[in-house]
Image (cartoon, coloured by chain):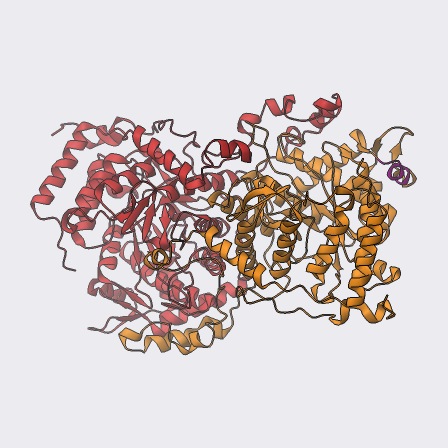
Chain colours: A orange, B red
């Protein structure tokens, strides 16, 4: 074991550094986009209060099931209406609002490389890769159940792209690793392959505690340092309608107690687990989210939390979820209004229902992404790679999505209107040229700016048809396929102090020897 | 020749009626979407004034070339600085603003079927099919130069889809018709195949006059009735930088004189025909548009006009135009701010640069369309079918675009938050059910609303992967291909009074015998 103190080892000696990724593509630099536009608000101010009142009535009159005795005890001591032996908890609005008001509107998350610190809240928009599909697909190997190799490859893509700011859950479920030790191998892989903020699933005591410990070790931190500031996160979903399950609540409370971030995302698909009306679905989403957020603020006042939105509609013919729909856009924007009502950061998703990385996938994702931008979403889950309503992670879609994420980040840069930008002198100069040269391509004003004036795509093809056809008439997924293969071929893992790497391995080995986590819940 | 008076014949006896289209797809009903959201505004109020001042300086200090002596005479009499024998015209801001203030902020366009009347301006958003590509393509016949059959087919699609509100220029150039008589056959085809508002190219006296006459005959109108209200439109482009050509000015003035709508759209691609800075490109676009709009308001005060925006960026490697880019979105939104500054309706486009109806085409078009919605564009040219930066009309893309146009129209419907929408009682009712039935799929509240609660797609596939694969794993263009073929197979032309049809044919025959239009300009 290394003798260096945790403080000296912090960040593996690379604090604040972001290594330039390989040259596979000319991508944008690491930065956190900030939304300068006013959000789009489908509800009037009164409309927001109306939805708020409905959410309060749900909490006061109907109540929420908390399938966790410890959680119910904490809520009871906070003043909620809890009957011993019953799961249903009712809480009045004063209690809920007072607790939720303790949550910070903005905070940071600091991973093992402090240069990858991100700010959650305000105008910041963070992108997280796809999480949790059971399957993955690419043009070469087709669609298949997830395995560890695919898991690692998708983590490498998440590390490579600077437009991915945080790493989510498993980008595909590696079913070739036994569930009892899967979290150990996966978090180990993540800590070795990425230096960005990572996530833990709230799926049982051992998984949550092991992950927190591994992130602490990976950051070279003492327990006090780990808890001093948020360094990781979890996401919990309610089992809508009106229920919070044991593993989710347990994990959320464990993270909250140690000052780590928790997102609460109700699974309120309109027409299935929530009312068929958007107003009703958002009222229910708000109630379910606030119920758990109030709990967490009682457990640890001021702990970093995020309100999650996953409300979309279902196909009324089949009950299947739909994404990127008009209803999804409006629900996400309404969620933004509700989150701002409570001064909470918002999480939503870049989702689609398409079965292939084709045009439907692209427009559904583009509409979802627009919903995220126009709602002023702070954390966009499933930003890259999501297909089939979340049942498949597509390598080609991952690359396509990163192209659109980069465009959104560029879009957010404010437009400048200085005297130089207005270019009246440049227009006069071009106007004075002989007719054949009367264009701006060669103007001084252009020459001084053309390198950075416009967003430069790495995947979009802007050739004319003849050139495109002569080069093989490659459609977008084929071009994306070449890119991810080159990225993986050139991938270099971020540096890690050998002593930390050794400590991590030892921890994983020990916990495996102990049997990992039980798999019977 | 029919003896009936034009008045009796108006509308071919079907005034105000919109025949239900064939059952190829379950599409939305004919309606004009209205944008309820506040527009997205990248410029501050001061920023708008700064761009305005730059545009005024361009008009006052640099000036615009008007390659039309009649236009220059009219401008001179309006107070502009015009030197005999020189094309350059300078005008001061007072003159420009005074003239432009005469333009109506809102007006209607009434085609031969008054039931297809549309309102231009305000919150209304109108969709126009693709116009003017030299080539077209579909999955069966591949990419080919335009011909009359393809022209007719694309007009039929434009008539069929209720989300297409106006018909643009030629959806593909039918090069198998001689240019001298092409306008006669094309306008004849259009008047027979669609009852929506149609367009004339400003490409010479004969084409413009013939089209106006044919639209008058097609509507069963006297000359006075034709001029009493706007019934058709043209679009003119400046030859940027800073030039308005003869045919465009001539056509625009002819339409203005008869009270028909003119859109003025500068061709200000940033980095090529306009400054590489968006602020400069929009200042130049504004100056070029206002110069021609001031002329038209002097020619016919109060005539219906539209400010056009086509500002996008070019690929700085090749000079090729790019569309649906971050710069395109911002330029379109800035154009919306400038149009509102002058109280003018705005035209922009649903454009893309992709060479195939694939994912790139879809995200570029989705971003363009979002630019149109967020800028509060009133008329969206090239809404359906555009590919390759406008060089190709794709049948499959046409169908794909109509799916997204329908979604945008649905998105614009306000969100309702009545007590019934909030559904607190429905949530309590579902909550009281036994656990297995604790969902909203079968709830009374859902049953009463499920038919209309959500947008129903006709092209998007929401099946699960297995069902989709078992049904042939069809990607979006393949599904779109089946749809347009069914639409064309079932197409029924809108009714036309036989007397009007006869009069139209006779006019076309006579004008063909006279040689049509000269082809030497």
* Main secondary-structure element of the magenta-colored stretch: helix
Q: Position of residue A483 (x, y in %)?
A: 52, 58
Residue A500 in view here:
yes
Q: Which residues are magenta?
A: A68-74
Residue at point 38% right, 34% down? B483
Quadrant where the N terminus of chain A sits is bottom right
User: Which residue of the protein is positioned furthest toward the left in this rendering?
Assistant: B513
Q: Is residue B158 left or right of residue B203?
A: right
Which residue is the extreme one toward the front? A513
Q: Does residue A193 belong to the magenta stretch?
A: no
Which residue is painted at 50% across and 54% down in the image?
A480
Quadrant in which the C terminus of chain A appears: top right
Q: Give the residue at x 49% y 49%.
A: B370
Above or below for A486 versus B440: below
- Specify whether A64 is left or right of B194: right
> In the image, A235: left or right of B89?
right
Q: Residue A256, can we see it?
A: no
Q: Position of residue B517 (x, y in %)?
A: 13, 51
Q: Answer with the quarter of the image where residue B479 lies.
A: top left
Query: Is A447 situated above or below B269?
Result: below
Q: Is residue B177 left or right of residue B483?
A: left
Residue B395 percent location from the top left of the image: 34, 42
Q: Quadrant of residue A36?
A: bottom right
Q: In this picture, is B506 found above or below A428?
A: above
Nearer-the-camera pick, A474 or B88: A474
Q: How many marks?
A: 0
Whether A17 is drawn above or below B261: the answer is below
Where is residue A3? Give x, y as percent.
88, 70
């Amino acid at each position: 074991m290394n003798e260096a103190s945790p403080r000296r080892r912090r960040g593996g000696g690379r604090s604040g550094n972001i290594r330039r990724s390989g040259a596979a593509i000319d991508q944008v630099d690491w930065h956190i986009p900030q939304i300068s536009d006013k959000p789009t608000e489908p509800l009037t101010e009164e409309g927001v209060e109306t939805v708020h009142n409905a959410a309060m009535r749900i909490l006061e009159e109907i109540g929420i099931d908390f399938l966790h005795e410890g959680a119910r005890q904490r809520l009871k001591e906070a003043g909620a209406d809890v009957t011993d032996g019953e799961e249903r908890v009712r809480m009045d609005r004063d209690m809920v609002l007072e607790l939720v008001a303790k949550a910070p509107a903005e905070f940071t998350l600091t991973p093992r490389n402090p240069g990858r610190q991100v700010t959650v809240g305000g105008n910041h928009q963070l992108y997280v890769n796809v999480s949790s599909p059971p399957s993955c697909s690419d043009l070469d190997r087709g669609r298949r159940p997830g395995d560890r190799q695919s898991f690692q490859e998708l983590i490498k893509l998440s590390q490579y792209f600077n437009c991915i700011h945080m790493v989510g859950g498993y980008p595909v479920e590696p079913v070739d690793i036994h569930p009892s030790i899967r979290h150990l191998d996966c978090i180990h892989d993540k800590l070795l392959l990425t230096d960005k903020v990572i996530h833990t699933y709230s799926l049982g005591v051992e998984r949550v505690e092991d992950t927190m410990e591994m992130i602490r070790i990976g950051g070279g931190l003492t327990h006090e340092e780990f808890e001093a500031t948020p360094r990781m996160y979890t996401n919990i979903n309610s089992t809508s309608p009106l229920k919070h399950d044991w593993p989710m609540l347990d994990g959320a409370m464990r993270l909250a107690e140690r000052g780590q971030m928790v997102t609460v995302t109700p699974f309120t698909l309109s027409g299935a687990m929530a009312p068929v009306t958007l107003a009703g679905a958002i009222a229910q989403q708000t109630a379910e989210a606030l119920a758990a957020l109030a709990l967490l603020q009682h457990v640890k006042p001021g702990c970093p939390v995020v309100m999650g939105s996953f409300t979309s509609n279902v196909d009324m013919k089949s009950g299947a979820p739909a994404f990127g729909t008009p209803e999804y856009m409006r629900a996400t924007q309404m969620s933004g209004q509700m989150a701002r009502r409570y001064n909470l950061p918002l999480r939503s998703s870049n989702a689609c229902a398409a079965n292939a990385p084709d045009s439907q996938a692209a427009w559904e994702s583009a509409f979802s992404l627009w919903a995220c931008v126009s709602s002023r979403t702070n954390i966009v889950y499933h930003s890259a790679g999501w297909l089939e309503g979340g049942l498949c992670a597509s390598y080609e879609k991952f690359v396509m999505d990163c192209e659109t994420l980069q465009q959104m980040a560029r879009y957010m840069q404010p437009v400048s209107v200085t005297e130089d930008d207005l270019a009246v002198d440049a227009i006069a100069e071009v106007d004075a040229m002989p007719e054949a040269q009367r264009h701006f391509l060669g103007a001084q004003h252009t020459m001084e700016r053309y390198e950075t004036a416009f967003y430069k795509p790495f995947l979009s093809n802007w050739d004319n048809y003849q050139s495109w056809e002569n080069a093989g008439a490659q459609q977008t997924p084929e071009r994306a396929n070449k890119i991810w293969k080159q990225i993986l071929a050139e991938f270099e893992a971020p540096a890690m102090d050998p002593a930390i790497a050794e400590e991590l391995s030892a921890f994983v080995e020990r916990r495996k020897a102990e049997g990992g986590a039980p798999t019977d819940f």
